[in-house]
Amino acid sequence: MSATTMPATGPARRWRLSGLLAGIVVALALLLAVLGPVLVQQDPLAQDLLALNEPPSGAHPLGTDHLGRDVLARLASGARLTLLVGVGGATLAFLLGAGLGLLALALGGAARAAAFAAFDLLRALPGILLAMLLVAALAPGPASIMLALGLSYAPMVAEVARAAHARESASDYVAAARAFGLSRLAVLMRHVLPNLVGALLTLAAIILPRCIVTESVLSFLGLGGTPELPSWGRMIADAGNFAEEAPHAVLAPVLALSLFTLALSVLGERARAAADPLRGGTS
């Protein structure tokens, strides 16, 4: 059998299988977040003091927590909040980092210097520390966390946008567009920006799981809003004190958070491989 007709190798099959499993995990998480109220009839805030820390049963498929609340209902409600805040924070990071960064690069001069000086100041602090400071300074809640995530990860997006912009700006087609008299902003919108979409989408697959993990850490530390507001980080913090009595209550959000962020990371790796022709999609 010739090399061109040999079946896929073991690494190639594992590569495709891991991508398929990651896609299934992400799809299930999105399904739980969107259709949670339909699929789970229990109230995530309803307490049953006669059913504290009960193991999984027919009435409660994932058991109850220390206040008798249904773990599955809280997991579904927490998925909506965690995904909303994570996606919102990542979107804001791209609007600030890529939007303002590319606009400043197109304008040049003082605008470019001021914008990237601000990004350098934000980048001087670790992302999680900056997010904690911002949330603590503002009123704790989902909106504050989204703002904190956006400001924390905007410098990373801005640096990638600047590098990609510099690469594309050195291309012949950009030089030709400028020779025809197009302004910097017109060149950016018509010629440079369409060629940056692939790099920015790949970066989005990297930043999104980081935003979700950061949101969970902030919620775990009590900075995610009111105590009864269900999120995966808050569920882990609440159930951690009763791990011996009700391990199911802490394992459910831990596994959900771990599997979901791992799946997003795998999909991000697939996006990077697809954007890199030298990797061939199998490494």
Image (tube, rainbow, N blue to C red):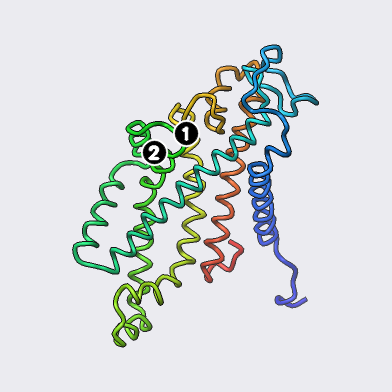
Give the residue displayed 25% in from the left and 51% down from the top: 118
Spatial CA span between label 2 and label 1: 8 Å
User: The N terminus appears in which quarter of the rendering?
Assistant: bottom right
Residue 282 bears which disc, if any? Answer: none
Q: Position of residue 23 (x, y in %)?
A: 65, 53
Answer whether labels 2 and 1 touch (C-beta < 8 Å): yes
* Left-right relation of 154 to 4: left
Q: Position of residue 100 (x, y in %)?
A: 33, 59
Q: Secondary structure at mark 2?
A: helix
204 w.r.t. 171: above or below: above
237 w.r.t. 201: above or below: above
Give the residue displayed 53% in from the left and 71% down from the top: 277
101 and 259: which is toward the camera = 101
Give the residue displayed 34% in from the left and 39% down from the top: 130
Q: Position of residue 5 (x, y in %)?
A: 75, 75
Residue 128 bears which disc, if any? Answer: 2
User: The C terminus appears in which quarter of the rendering?
Assistant: bottom right
Quadrant position of residue 169 = bottom left
Give the amino acid at mark 1.
Val
